[in-house]
Image (tube, coloured by chain):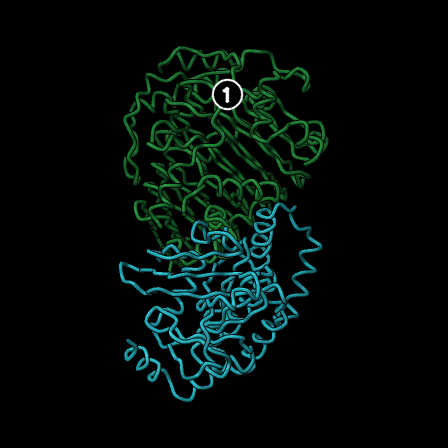
Chain colours: A cyan, B green
Amino acid sequence: MNTTNNNQSQTLTSPLLERLGEALLTIKNLHANINGKEILKGLDLTVRPGEIHAIMGPNGAGKSTLASVLTGNPAFEVTHGSVTFQGKDLLELAPEQRANEGIFLSFQYPVEIPGVSMVNFMRTAINEQRKYRGLDQISATDFLRLMREKKELVEMDNKLANRSVNEGFSGGEKKRNEIFQMAMLDPSLSILDETDSGLDIDALRIVANGVNKLKRPNNASIVITHYQRLLDYIIPDFVHVLYDGKIVKSGTKDLAFELEERGYDWIKQEVEEAP
Amino acid sequence: MAEDILHEVTQADYKYGFTTDIETDIIPIGLNEDVVRLISAKKNEPDWLLEYRLKAYRHWTTMKMPEWAQLKIPEIDYQSISYYAAPRKNAPKNLDEVDPELLNTFNKLGIPLEEQMALSGIAVDAVMDSVSVKTTFKETLAEKGIIFCSFSEAVEHHPDLVRKYMGSVVPHTDNFYAALNTAVFSDGSFVYIPKGVRCPMELSTYFRINAMNTGQFERTLIVADEDSYVSYLEGCTAPMRDENQLHAAIVEIVVQKNAEVKYSTVQNWYPGDKEGKGGVYNFVTKRGICKGDNSKLSWTQVETGSAITWKYPSCILQGDNSSAEFYSVAVTNHHQQADTGTKMIHLGKNTSSHILSKGISAGVSNNSYRGLVRVAANAENARNFSQCDSLLLGDKCGAHTFPYMEVNNDSAVVEHEATTSKINEDQIFYCNQRGISTEDAVGLIVNGYAKEVINKLPMEFAVEAQKLLQITLEGSVG
């Protein structure tokens, strides 16, 4: 890996960093296929509580695949490697168990569910999470209070909450709705898959504000993005470059600026020239 | 993934599969004039009714089972069925006198009579097999002149009303099953709402098939006189068994001038097992007539049960400005087959009808919508809107739509829309990612899909119907 720029680039699985705190998520040598085609080819990543990790990289590098694999999308098959989340073997868990363990994915393309109101959808989701954690169902009053509070957080229109899940929402509204759901479910690890795509600057600011307000010492985020733009609003602790199914370079926020300026070609060259 | 879903659906068993050990009074199998006479005699019927039954029987012997439906119906040996079964004990006067076994059955179904009486304000005419076991709230209704009783009681106490209206909407010659029902019908419900009376409560009948090898031939007659209103609920579940059961009911509704009738059904007869063994054959003729001007009839049905369903709740719009609605959710799973829909016959002027049909197919089932909209030559300004949606779960099931339109008047506006969609794996995963299991996700999505119809049901039925949809499709996607 890059050795000329040590202050920006670190190997996150180094023994030094591991001692800094208990990891929330540890991915080791992860390989995954879709339709028999290998997309992830030995990915390593460690995320600790309180951290924001940005994953950048060219199209087709495997960014969204990483999000899908972590959340258990059945279209993908893990062929090798391990993922530990809060001490549990994540790959052993069903998608809904992973969600209830505290992993949240803000989808790049949120789906529409006709006829299912946001209120009903969210109440079901919250109660499933509570059931999983051995808690009673949420009372109607508490639920409505929570809805109100979180709607304000993402500046979401009251009307949206009464409509069917994502049905007829604009691109920006869908993304805002994702962050609203994230606020409702209060995950310990949130994965934002290209949340900035298709957003105008105001929507981007609102979404980023929402994410920032939800940041706490005991939760973490993985922000998958194509552009540095989002990182003006959500300041990452680490920036990783994903290329050809592996993380090939890691650094701080400055790496994102460098990528914005120089593109990805120099990374590709570095990877190809590496012994 | 879809395969897993399918697999799981096919694993879901019928939740209401149990039988109760109540002694029943069964006559030997087979059908002939003597059996018809025996049924009539057991019920102490007047001669005119016996004659009517015999006329229907003789006509039936000249008829053949209809074969036009999109159904594969195994051969039925009508001589191997017993045509009458009644609980043996005398009718009880209060709950203490009701067979504890029967009460237990109702409790298993979640229909505690006592609770219903106390809490929901619904008058329950609970039909156990062929004879009414318990009728409630009769006194309250009687004060308003409303008659709500078993068909047999109506024959005994209100013969003129029965004689006037019985067969006036569904004549005994109407079809094979209607003729059969008219010949051998056992019991059912009778409702009469007098002029100007608004029925103060939802009228409800729970049906239950409970004797081995016994065909069930209900007969319901509802008459809403001028300016009256009634909402009638019918719901049923049936116990598990191996033998196929024949169920051929008739429902007739007469709606007079300015009157309104709402008829809601949740049907959950035993659908057969995963391999398609057993299950109820449900061949029902339901029809209403909007006889007077400005009359209104609405059918709402949630059909989740039966191995084979052949059912077209229909309406004859005879009065000027009359209107009719048909809202339907039909779910088929495993080997179930349903051919269901409606007929809207526009005769009067300025009549309107609205059809909303939501079909859901899973497993290797087949689900067909069949609907007729007919506008007669004199039916000026008739208006119809039909929407038929189909939702497929998996790729081994079938959905079919057969709309028929016969428009004989140029002023008519008849519209038909149809859609077919599949439950999307992305939708399921989206729900999963929010912590919702696949089973619950299917329930959520299906109930969302069917919401427009479910919302038409009275409150207490809507809740039951939602649960039923989910139970029927349990594990259908995974």
Compare residues B61 and B96 and report the one nearer the observer: B96
Residue beneath disc 1: B130
Is residue B195 toward the left or the right of residue B287 in the image?
A: right
State whether residue B385 appears in this view: no
Using the image, determine if residue A239 lies above or below residue B277: below
Q: In this view of the protein, which residue sits in the foreground, A132 or B296?
A: A132
Instruction: Please provide percent x and percent y for residue A210.
Output: 60, 72
Q: Secondary structure at mark 1?
A: loop
Q: Amino acid at mark 1?
A: Ser
Indicate left or right for B400 with B96 as reference: left
Which residue is farthest bottom? Answer: A261
Q: What subunit carries mark 1?
A: B
Image coords of residue A95 (percent x, y): 46, 53
B125 shown above or below A262: above
Circle 1: is it few (<14), some (14-19), or many (20+) Cα within 10 Å? many
Q: Where B409 sits versus B33, above or below? A: below
Q: Is residue B413 left or right of residue A87?
A: left
**Residue shown at 33%/42% (left/top)?**
B366
Which residue is rendered at x = 32% and y = 45% of the image? B397
Q: Is residue B29 visible?
A: yes
Question: Residue A224's x, y, as percent?
Answer: 46, 72
